[in-house]
Image (cartoon, coloured by chain):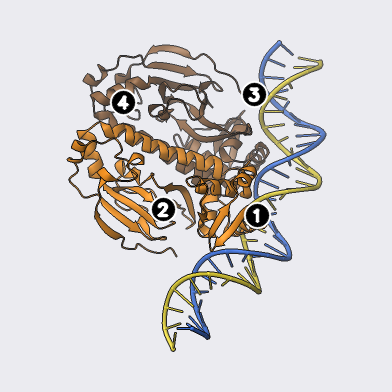
Chain colours: A brown, B orange, C yellow, D blue
Amino acid sequence: MQPTRIAAAWKGLAACQSCGIRRLALFADLEAEDFAHIHLPIEERSIPAGASLYGLDDPAEAVFTVRAGLVKLVHIQPDGGQRIVRLVRAGGVAGIEALVRPTYPHAAMALQPVELCRIPTSVVTRLQTETPRLHQRLMEKWYEALSVADDFLTELATGHARQRLARLLLWLSEDAPDQPVRLFSREDLGAILGVTLETTSRTISEFRRSGVLTTLSHNLVRCDRAALADIAG
Amino acid sequence: MQPTRIAAAWKGLAACQSCGIRRLALFADLEAEDFAHIHLPIEERSIPAGASLYGLDDPAEAVFTVRAGLVKLVHIQPDGGQRIVRLVRAGGVAGIEALVRPTYPHAAMALQPVELCRIPTSVVTRLQTETPRLHQRLMEKWYEALSVADDFLTELATGHARQRLARLLLWLSEDAPDQPVRLFSREDLGAILGVTLETTSRTISEFRRSGVLTTLSHNLVRCDRAALADIAG
DNA sequence: CGGCCTCTTGACAAGTATCAAAGTTTGTGG
DNA sequence: CCACAAACTTTGATACTTGTCAAGAGGCCG
C-alpha cells in the first residue's frame, strides 16, 4: 500500500517577492502593488519522499508550485493499477486543474523530498480579476503542463523499454547534467514507462553492466548522457 | 508522403453570436458588447480529410475551433516517424499553443472532413484585455486539452493492442453511440495507439470475426459498445 | 538475529514487430 | 467504361521483446 497523507512541515508564510525561483514560478511578472491583493496565506512546505500532496477527487482548493524535488501525478486505473501521467520538477506547477475543477482529477505524491508553495485557488482567481499580469503567466503554465504531457507520450510511451528508460534518465538529469541522478522505486519507474518493474530492473542492470550507469550509492547513479542519447535514438 | 497543404474553402466571416456549437466553444460566455471588440476576421472553413491545418514550426497566428469532424495533432519524430499525440473533435480547440508560442509545436491535419473556425490570436489576446469573461473559458479549454492528453496516455498507450483499440473505438463513438464510426487509415490508427499498422489491421479483423465490429461500407463500422467496454477492461 | 520489503535474476509464455506476399480499393488515362 | 497503376489492407511466418510466475539476494528495522 502507498503511504497515506503525512502532515507537512509548516514553514509559515511565503516570501514571494524574494523567492529564489520566482523567475520560473507563477508570480514572476507580478509587481509590488499586486502582492497587496493577496489576503490568504501562501504556505511554504517541506514534504518527505512518499508523502501525498493531494488525492484523487480531493476538494481542489490550492495550486502547488514546486521549488525543489520531484512530484508524480498518478491516474488510478479502475483495476487498481497506477499510471504516472506526468512528473513535476522545480519551477513546475502541480494541481493547476484546481483553477477550473472542484476536485483534483489525479493524485500527487512526492518521489523525492519536495519543497513547495501552496497557493489557495482564491488567491489566483482574485489576482486574476485585479491584475492582467497573471494571465499570460498562467497560460504559460498550462502550456508547460500540456507540453510535458505530450513529451511523456512521445518519449516515454513510445519505442522499446531501453529507449524509454534512456529518455527518462536524460530527462531526470537535464536540469543538472553533471550531477548524479537519484532514482526511485522500480515500481514507480515502471509506472512512468508503462512497463513492469521486472523489465525496469533488468534494463537498469543492463545499463550498469555496459557502463552507461554507475552506481554511487543506493539508488544514486551517474549517467553517461552521450551513451543514453545514443540508446534513446 | 503526406498530402501537402490544400487551400481550404473560404466561407467568409463567422457568425459567432448565432453559432450552433457556441455553448461548447471558446466564446460561449461572451456578450453582445464583447463582439464589438473583434476587429480581425474570424474565418469559417471547410477542410477535406487529409488536409493540413498547420505544420510543425509554422508561425502560430491563429487558434482553431473544431465545429465538426476530427483533427489529429502529430509530433514528428527525429527518425521521420509520426506519433499522434492528441485528437480534437467537435467543440475542441486545436493550436491553443498559439497563445503562448510564436510557432506551433506540432502539426495538425484533418482525419475526417472538418468544419472549423480560424480565430486570429490577436482577437483572443485583445478580448482578454477588454473582458474578463474569456479567462475562465480559456482555462477550461487548456484543461480540456490537458485532460485529453492524460487520457491518451492512460487509455491509449497502456495495455495490450486489443484493449487500446477497443478504448479508441469507444472514444470515437461516444459522441453518438448509436451512429456508426468512420475509421481512417491503419497507419493513423497505429500512430494513435503506438502499434504498427499490421497489428492494427489484425486486431480490427479479429473484432470483425468476433462480431464486435460490423462493416457497413468501406471504413464505416457499427460498434458493439458493450463488448468493446468488456475488452477495454 | 529474524522478518519484511525491495530488488535481481531465471525460465517460459504471450504479444508484437518485422519482413514478405497476395488481395483490395482508388484514381487516372486511354 | 474499362484497364492499369499506385496505394492501402489483409494475412502469413518468424524473430524479438516483454509479461508472468517463481525463487533467491540484499538491505532495513524491530
What is the chain identity of the residue bearing mark 3?
A: A
Labels 3 and 2 positioned on one and the same chain:
no
Q: Position of residue A86 (x, y in %)?
A: 49, 35
Mark in front: 3 vs 4 = 3
Left or right for C11, reference D7: right
| Residue at which label 2 appears | B69
Q: Is A119 above or below relative to A159?
A: above
Which element is circle 3 on?
loop
Confirm or deny contact between disc 3 and disc 4 (CB under 8 A): no
**The one of B62 and A24 positioned closer to us in this rendering:** B62
| Residue at which label 4 appears | A27
Mark in front: 3 vs 2 = 2
Q: Position of residue A129 (x, y in %)?
A: 26, 25
What is the chain identity of the residue bearing mark 4?
A: A
Confirm or deny contact between disc 1 and disc 4 (CB under 8 A): no
| Residue at which label 1 appears | B211
Q: CA distance from mark 3 to mark 2?
A: 44 Å
| Residue at which label 3 appears | A1
Classify the position of the N terminus of chain A by image quarter: top right
Give the amino acid at mark 2: Gly
Q: CA distance from mark 3 to mark 4?
A: 37 Å
